[in-house]
Amino acid sequence: MTVPTGVALSLLDRSRTRAGEPDSAGVTGTVARAVAAERLGYDRFFVAEHHGVPGVASAAPAVLLAAIAGRTTTLRIGSAGVMLPHHQPLVVAEQFAMLSALAPGRVDLGLGRSPGFTPPVRRALRSADGDDFAGDLAELRAFLTGTAEVTVHPRPAAPVPMTVLATGRGLEVAAALGLPVVVGGPLLGVAGDPAPGLDALARYRDGYRPSAQAPEPRVSISLDVLVAGTDDEARDLLLPEAWAMARARTEGTFPPLQPVTDIGSMTAIQRRYVDQSTAAAVAGTADQVTERLGALLERTGAAELIASSSTFDRAALAASDAALAELFGRQPAAGRAPASAVPSGA
């Protein structure tokens, strides 16, 4: 099994904080990783939006993307994603039109609908039940395409493709509006029965209504992917993130990443959550990762892999990013295609 040709390769960095570091190191680390991703030949680099989470420093995607735009020249950059229920569509359109003016032809807008990590965060965000996600998406697209009652300024210097971070109902919304999707988690069937996820993707493709911005359905898949020299090294790379997820589910807080040597004993339920997280990732030697990714990409028909990996050891993460780019045949620096090689509807 090999990785299918023609599949776009991207990174998602959530600006994970690390024990013993200031939060600012999480943000500057994201910018440095984006610069390295451009050099390695990645197609796109995404940042996230999280509020009030100790383990994540990325709360303002548009601001962070502006910093990345200033340090890169060819890499496409985008959000994965802006949580639309927290914002007025006009404000999001203005932010990404501004980014497009700063980095023409390189900006993508991924959108989700997460309500917030905890009740206090949701209250602080003024989150409300019953948000009209489909309506907000349509309104936002009208602003970005210049068909709305209000004209956005600065006018986008180039089209700003929109993508939906979709699970369940989100796939139906994206199909109805003619928008590409990013899927992850249970829909991928990485650690279990793939049938429900494949059925959902089939319904998305079958029900897709072509739009001017995206005439064909397009699926990107997102999951943790880590390449190491041995199985043991791969497990060590996965453990800090898996442990943080286990603590979030059992203690109600998503903490900074810890070094493997500081992760002590676990309860039975924490061990189960750690095992679930590691099973849902693709990690191992280059041959093992190639085999698993090839099967996953073939099964889902995905046009893009978005590796959302994180680990405590930044040097090991950088080495994994480089190894993954090599698996996809990417050429560092001068040998790469320009950012416009990624389809405009992506």
Image (cartoon, rainbow, N blue to C red):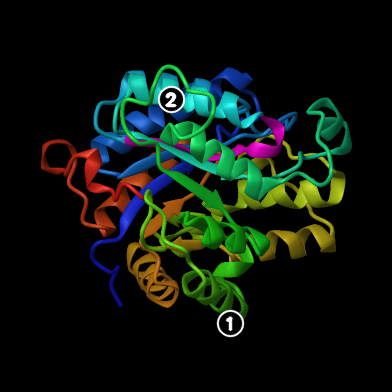
Which type of secondary structure does the marked residue at label 2 adopt?
Answer: helix
Left or right, 250 with respect to 280, comes to: right
Q: Which residues are magenta?
A: 76-87
Residue at 55% x, 26% y: name it: 26
Residue 246 placed where, x, y %? 75, 52
Q: Count residues near mark 1 (Cα–Cα under 10 Å), then give few for <14, some for 14-19, many for 20+.
A: few
Q: Magenta segment: does it hold 313?
A: no
Q: Quadrant of residue 66?
A: top left
Q: Nearer the viewer, residue 180 or 331?
A: 180
Residue placed under numbered mark 2 in the picture: 97
Residue at 60% x, 64% y: name it: 172
Residue at 47% x, 57% y: name it: 178
Residue at 55% x, 61% y: name it: 176
Q: Count residues near mark 2 (Cα–Cα under 10 Å), then give few for <14, some for 14-19, many for 20+.
A: many
Q: Earlier in the sequence, mark 2 or mark 1?
A: 2
Quadrant of the image containing the N terminus? bottom left
Vertical relation: 7 (above or below) 51: below
Residue placed under numbered mark 1 in the picture: 195
Left or right, 254 with respect to 316, comes to: right
Residue 39 placed where, x, y %? 24, 35
Residue 336 placed where, x, y %? 16, 43
What amino acid type is highlighted by mark number 1? Ala
Which type of secondary structure does the marked residue at label 1 adopt?
Answer: helix
